[in-house]
Image: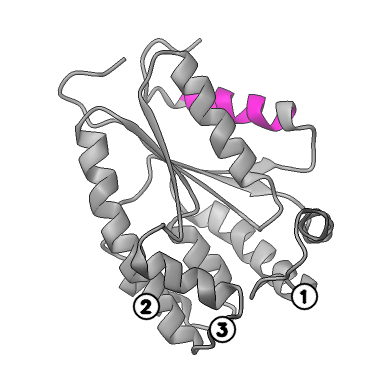
Amino acid sequence: MKMKNKRMPFIAFEGLDGSGLTTQASRLRDWLSSKGYEVYLTKEPTDGLIGSLIRGVLRKELVIDAETLALLFAADRMLHTKNIIKLLDEGVIVITDRYRLSSYAFQSIEVDLDWLKKINEKALTPDLTFIIDTPPLICMRRIQKQRFHVELYEELEKLEKIHAIYRKLAEEESNTFLIDGNRPVEAVSSDIFDRVKESALLEGLE
């Protein structure tokens, strides 16, 4: 299903690693696809050259300073944004697993938030952003079950700081909703689906 002469919605999912945002982004894609919409699910860092470099830093395979990492994320996002806009204009709903608020929440524990906002000011603002709000300790337990290595930000003290920043961003950013992620997957999805329906961004959702 495509809406004539109207750019399709851009939806972002945010949250701590282990919060469930990847699961919920996939479930929203599947739900919207079942309603007849063409949906593209993407992620950050991207699979491009810059994104691959970022993932190496996150896995601690490469050590760089926090400001340089922030610039790499902004550059990766700028390229990503151009592809997102192209898809939206072609009638495709785009859902991203992480976007601009990830830079604000994660990187501002070491880098000035106003500077982060400045270097990301050209990034497209999502029509809806869902922050999956899951307690840091729960996220750490999930991470430890899912894989053997711990990435750059995955320490409980850091996650607690990032969690607090995400909550603050939820109050400041437009069209941004904090979703309780410490519940059964289906209950979390139901809240998200209801928010999408209430937004009136799409026709024919029931």
Q: Which mark is residue 71?
A: 2
Residue matched to label 1: 157
Mark 2 or mark 3, whichever is nearer to me: 2
**Between discs 2 and 3, the one toward the N terminus:** 2
Dominant secondary structure of the residues highlighted in magenta in the image: helix
Q: Residue at x 21, y 42 (%)?
A: 86
**200 or 17: nearer the eye?**
17
**Between discs 3 and 1, the one toward the N terminus:** 3
Q: Residue at x 37, y 78 (%)?
A: 71
Mark 1 or mark 2, whichever is nearer to me: 2
Q: CA distance from mark 1 to mark 2?
A: 24 Å
Q: Which mark is residue 69?
A: none
- Check the image and report above or below for 194 versus 172: above
Secondary element under disc 3, as helix, strand or loop, is loop
Q: In the image, which residues are magenta?
A: 187-198
Secondary element under disc 1, as helix, strand or loop, is helix
User: In this view of the protein, can residue 123 be seen by the observer?
Assistant: no
- Amino acid, disc 3: Glu
Q: Is residue 189 magenta?
A: yes
- Check the image and report above or below for 98 versus 179: below
Q: Is residue 158 magenta?
A: no
- Amino acid, disc 1: Glu
Q: Residue at x 57, y 81 (%)?
A: 61
Secondary element under disc 2, as helix, strand or loop, is helix
* Quarter of the figure with the N terminus: top left
User: In this view of the protein, can residue 141 be seen by the observer?
Assistant: yes
Residue 51, percent from left and from top? 41, 65
Residue 33, percent from left and from top? 45, 20
**168 or 49: nearer the eye?**
49
- Amino acid, disc 2: Leu
Check disc 1: other Cα within 10 Å, few if <14, some if 14-19, many if 20+. Answer: few
Q: Which mark is residue 110?
A: 3
